[in-house]
Image (cartoon, helix red, strand yellow):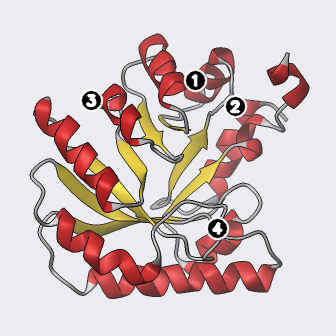
Amino acid sequence: MGISEAYKDLKNEIPKDVKLICVSKTRQINEIKEAYAAGARDFGENKAQELMEKHDSLEQDIKWHFIGHLQRNKVKYIVGKVHLIHSLDSIRLLQEIEKQYGAKDEIASVLIQVNIGKEDAKTGIAASEIDSLIQACEKCNNIKVKGLMATIPIGNVEDCRMYFNEMKRMFDNLKTFKYKNVSMEFLSLGMSGDFEIALQAGSNMIRLGEKIFGRRDYKKLEG
């Protein structure tokens, strides 16, 4: 199945109110253009340099999502280029985003990344630290928190459902409060291997790469 057909099939499969992010990291310009021609406008990258190059090479109505770990020294490169940062995971990163976006009088839309599985190898803030991060967000002038994001541990269906449900409960709970600069609009959960379970749990934003573009040829990438 081609990229265009895969994208269109997915759009028909998922609910209308779910935002589909095409994970285009490591993908070639022509592959992105094929998805774009099929109607895709939201694309996800995890490296600042790659995002910058693609941003400057492709159509300007594309909405770029930064979905990887964002290093503080890379923030200045993505100001004005990113529609949504999915990976706010610390007060120190928050402060750097506020500084760099403030310097250019821009507003950063972000999601708080939660390390719901408490995995040492993954970034994301601990659930117990979210309140402190939100309090810091309320003091900002150039940041708007739009929701939560998580990448869950690899596991069986029941494990996946447990983590997704836990994120949904957290999301719904935060929705009941009124914060300055914080609104729970997006729950970014689900990738190519588990997005159906994420949707059942209430995710309204999914991040799919292989499901759209096919499996990556890592030998070609290394070469």
Q: Is disc 3 surrounded by few (<14), some (14 to 19) or many (20+) residues within 10 Å?
A: few
Horizontally, residue 177 falls left or right of residue 48, namely: left
The residue type indicated by label 3 comes to: Gly
Judged by depth in the image, the label closer to the viewer, 3 or 1, is 3
Horizontally, residue 61 falls left or right of residue 219, namely: left
Q: List x then y, in percent, for residue 33.
A: 60, 20
Residue that appears at 68% across and 26% down: 27
Q: Is residue 62 above or below residue 157?
A: above
The residue type indicated by label 2 comes to: Ser
What secondary structure is found at the residue carrying circle 1?
helix
Q: Is residue 212 above or below residue 154?
A: above
The residue type indicated by label 4 comes to: Asp
Residue that appears at 12% across and 56% down: 140
Numbered tag placed on residue 120 in the rendering = 4
Q: Is residue 132 above or below residue 121?
A: below
Residue ID for mark 1: 37
What secondary structure is found at the residue carrying circle 3?
loop
Numbered tag placed on residue 80 in the rendering = 3
Q: Earlier in the sequence, mark 3 or mark 2?
A: 2
Q: Earlier in the sequence, mark 1 or mark 4?
A: 1
Q: Are marks 2 and 1 in contact (CB under 8 Å)?
A: yes
Q: CA distance from mark 3 to mark 2?
A: 28 Å
Horizontally, residue 216 falls left or right of residue 206, namely: right
